[in-house]
Image (cartoon, helix red, strand yellow):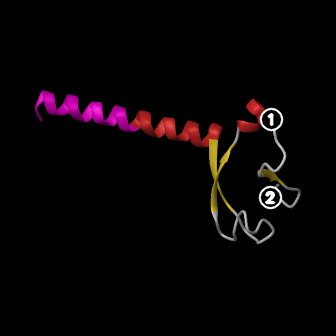
């Protein structure tokens, strides 16, 4: 392999690795996907609808009336409430 090709492959590997680490941090710390199961939040959220949960938003600006929240329930799974 030519030296330029090796450098380019290494550059791509670094970029892909950095991107994967960044995605893992964002997903683990800032946002997480969630699936709504059940119809208790109709018509706001429908059954089997996917939502993106902001994990740190309430710690920055607090909760307001009518905010939709996701929390860990006693049953062992996440619950969605207003």
Q: Which image quarter: residue 49?
A: bottom right
Determine the image quadrant of residue 81: bottom right
Residue drawn at (35%, 32%) of the image = 14
Q: Is residue 44 above or below residue 31?
A: below
Q: Position of residue 61 (x, y in %)?
A: 76, 32
Please rate how many residues cluster around mark 2, counting C-alpha atoms within 10 Å: few if below 14, some from 14 to 19, many from 20: some
Q: Quadrant of the N terminus?
A: top left
Q: Nearer the viewer, residue 81 or 33?
A: 81
Q: Main secondary structure of the magenta part?
A: helix
Location of residue 64 (image quadrant)? top right
Residue identifier under label 1: 62
Whether residue 28 sits left or right of residue 10 in the image: it is right
In this rendering, the answer to whether 38 lies above or below 68 is below
* Residue 46 within the segment the image draws in magenta: no
Relative image position of residue 5 (x, y in whole percent): 16, 33
Q: Position of residue 65 (x, y in %)?
A: 84, 46
**Which region of the structure is painted magenta?**
1-16
Instruction: Say if the magenta span includes residue 7.
Output: yes
* Left or right of residue 8: residue 59: right
Neighbours of disc 1 within 10 Å: few (<14), some (14-19), many (20+): few
Please report the residue visible at 82 percent of the width from the left and 55 percent of the height from the top.
82
Q: Circle 1 — which element? A: loop
Residue corresponding to mark 2: 79
Asked if residue 5 is positioned above or below residue 82 in the image, the reply reads above
Residue at horizontal 54 percent and vertical 40 percent from the top: 24
User: How far apart are labels 2 and 1 at the CA level?
Assistant: 19 Å
Q: Residue furthest left?
A: 2
Front: mark 2 or 1: 1
Q: Who's the residue at 51% across and 40% down the image?
A: 23
Is label 2 in a helix, a strand or a loop?
strand
| Residue 54 horizontal/vertical position (percent) | 67, 43
């Amino acid at each position: 392999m030519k030296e330029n090709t090796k450098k380019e492959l290494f550059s791509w590997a670094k970029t892909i690795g950095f991107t994967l680490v960044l995605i893992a941090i964002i997903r683990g710390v800032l946002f997480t996907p969630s699936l709504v199961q059940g119809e208790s939040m109709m018509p706001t959220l429908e059954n089997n609808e996917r939502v993106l949960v902001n994990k740190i938003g309430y710690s920055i600006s607090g909760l307001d009336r009518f905010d939709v929240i996701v929390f860990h329930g006693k049953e062992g799974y996440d619950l969605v409430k207003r």
